[in-house]
Image (cartoon, rainbow, N blue to C red):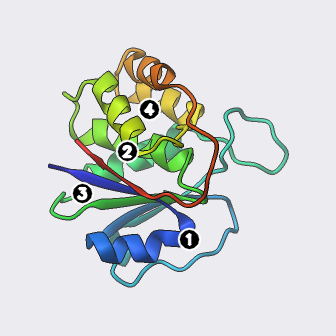
Amino acid sequence: MPTIIVSPLKTIGEMAGRHQSREMISLIAEKHDFHRPGIIDPTRHLTVTVNDIAFAGKDGLIAPAEAHVQSIIDFVRGWDQANPLLIHCWMGVSRSPAAALIAALAVEPDIDDDELARRLRAASPQATPNTRLVEIGDAMLGRSGRLIDAVKAIGRGSDYVGEAPFKLEF
């Protein structure tokens, strides 16, 4: 069963080692420096420079765009799935859960959107997928609004209580 590990930045080293992840997607703000865990293959690490915002126009911030989502889709279609894919952002609550949903649907398009969103909620009570990433992913993957509706159905996550990496199996 394909598995995605969603993590805040603070725990990527621990999560990569614990789950033997060799591939990673980082959704991180511009100029936000961090160290890639040594277990991650440098040729299989995608950095998506994007802020956790839901609309364009904020001064100096980069809103999610089609090019960001396309890079995630292209990257995961090369994922060998022998080991879990690690996806992280700053807190592991918004950008990375949205990217995990997009990644899952990109490699397994027959998954039911509602079931996938329910699995996300069960794995992480505090996940609140970035709405702009979800909307763009829905359109680019031809989900006809199903992913948007599924994420709306699970609602906003609980209040942030700290680092809480999780596993999304599909």
- Residue placed most toward the observer, 39 or 120: 120
Q: CA distance from mark 4 to mark 3?
A: 18 Å
Which kind of residue does numbered mark 3 sit on?
Trp
Q: CA distance from mark 2 to mark 3?
A: 22 Å
Which of marks 4 and 1 precedes in the sequence? 1
Q: Read off the residue under disc 2.
A: 123
**What percent of the width, then of the height, locates residue 17?**
33, 77
Which kind of residue does numbered mark 2 sit on?
Ala
**Residue count near mark 3 (Cα–Cα under 10 Å), binned few <14, some 14–19, many ≥20:** some
Q: Read off the residue under disc 4.
A: 137
* As drawn, 59 above or below 22: above
Q: Read off the residue under disc 3.
A: 79
Q: Is residue 52 visible?
A: yes
Q: Is residue 21 visible?
A: no
Which of marks 1 and 3 precedes in the sequence? 1
**What percent of the width, then of the height, locates residue 82?**
15, 62
* As drawn, 44 above or below 36: above
Assign a secondary structure to mark 3: loop
* As drawn, 20 above or below 88: below
Q: CA distance from mark 1 to mark 4?
A: 26 Å
Assign a secondary structure to mark 4: helix
- Residue placed most toward the observer, 78 or 98: 98
Which of marks 2 and 4 precedes in the sequence? 2
Q: Read off the residue under disc 1.
A: 10
**What percent of the width, then of the height, locates residue 50?**
62, 51
